[in-house]
Image (cartoon, rainbow, N blue to C red):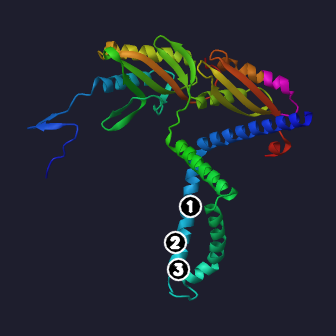
Amino acid sequence: MTVIRVVAGGLRGLAVGVALLIVAVAVLLVALASRIVLVLGFVLLALLALVALAAAIFEINGGRGTVSLAHLATLIHLPDLRHYVGVYLRRVEAPGPVAWVSVGAGVGAVVVGLLLLAGVFVPRRERLIALGETERGPMLARRRALARVAAALAEQPRGVTKARARARPRRGGRGGTLRVRATREAVRERRQTEREIEERLAPLSEPFELAARVDARRVTDDRRVQ
Amino acid sequence: MTPAVSPASSRLGSLVVVPAPSVRVRLAQVALGAALSVDGVAAAGQGNRFAGAVTLDGAPLAGVSVIALREGRYELGLALIARPVALHALADRVRERVTVAAGVADLGDRLGPINIVFEDIADPAIVEVA
């Protein structure tokens, strides 16, 4: 009984993991849809152009000559492909596991297509960071503006070789989070450097309620050579 | 040769009649001019952060948006690129200057909330930001 429970628990965990993975992939697809479609469109157009060029060239001779469509079909093994596809299509037509897999794949393809379409056509609005609110209206800032300021501030402490920053707004409220990743000289102590960076960020983070998360890693030797 | 006539104007004999800009467009022009005159404002941003983008002679007016509210007032959106100065104080100065300029242009009673977005910092190597 215990073994069954353990297995059932494991399967349940696996199912939850798979579900989370599917959701993550869906979110990623929507986020990157416009780029994916751009790349896919280019690749498919290039392939189409190549196919059309080959077809045009092999149409020069009719019949079964060297430069003929029939010979082209033989070159790319279309008769073999027809044989395999024919077998598969017959299995799909007949009731059985292959038919159900095909139905699943078709539904999956439709869902992926819909997600890609949603990613392309649903407009994405950049979330701004609320810095303050007065009776005359709000004061907001783009993430990039604050991130650039934070990076510039984080590069000021002694021993910091480089800093990158990201700003994220808080959901439904003022302020947000500043994530700073800096590199430091090996001789500098990590915590000390992070504290110094946080102190430099204070004029930005405290009045605008931005929680600073600083990570000061040691610069690697190869970077130092560069 | 037929003289060119602007689509936004019409000719009555030799008199060219140009339609006056709407209150919305005037408010956008006044507000943007006032905001850009404030010390600490480097330039206008792209200004597409709010709905209500304003066009003048067919061209979009960058950095400003105006949305009509009830009772004849308008909500203003200003997208600005700031110099490295204290942003809270800068936003206050911009609001004050815009309010004064709207009053001078006889648009004071049309002015509603002023939303300010700092799109970028002209030179981020700074110390004073709050």
Q: How far is mark 3 from mark 1, CA to CA? A: 20 Å
Which residue type does callout 2 highlight?
Ala
Marking on residue B60: none
Label 3 belongs to which residue? A57
Chain of the residue on which disc 3 is drawn: A
Query: Is A154 within the magenta?
Result: no
Asked whether the residues under marks 3 and 1 belong to the same chain, the reply is yes
Question: x, y (%) of residue A52?
Answer: 52, 72
Location of residue A192 by image quarter: top right
Q: Which residues are magenta?
A: A184-195
- Is any atom of residue B40 visible in this view? yes
| In the depicted structure, whether residue A187 falls above or below residue B101 | below
Chain of the residue on which disc 1 is drawn: A
The secondary element bearing badge 2 is classed as helix
Asked whether, in this view, residue B120 is left or right of residue A210, the answer is left
Marking on residue A44: 1
Crowd around label 2: few <14 · some 14–19 · many ≥20 (10 Å): few
The numbered mark, 3 or 1, whose residue comes first in the sequence reads 1
Which residue type does callout 3 highlight?
Ile
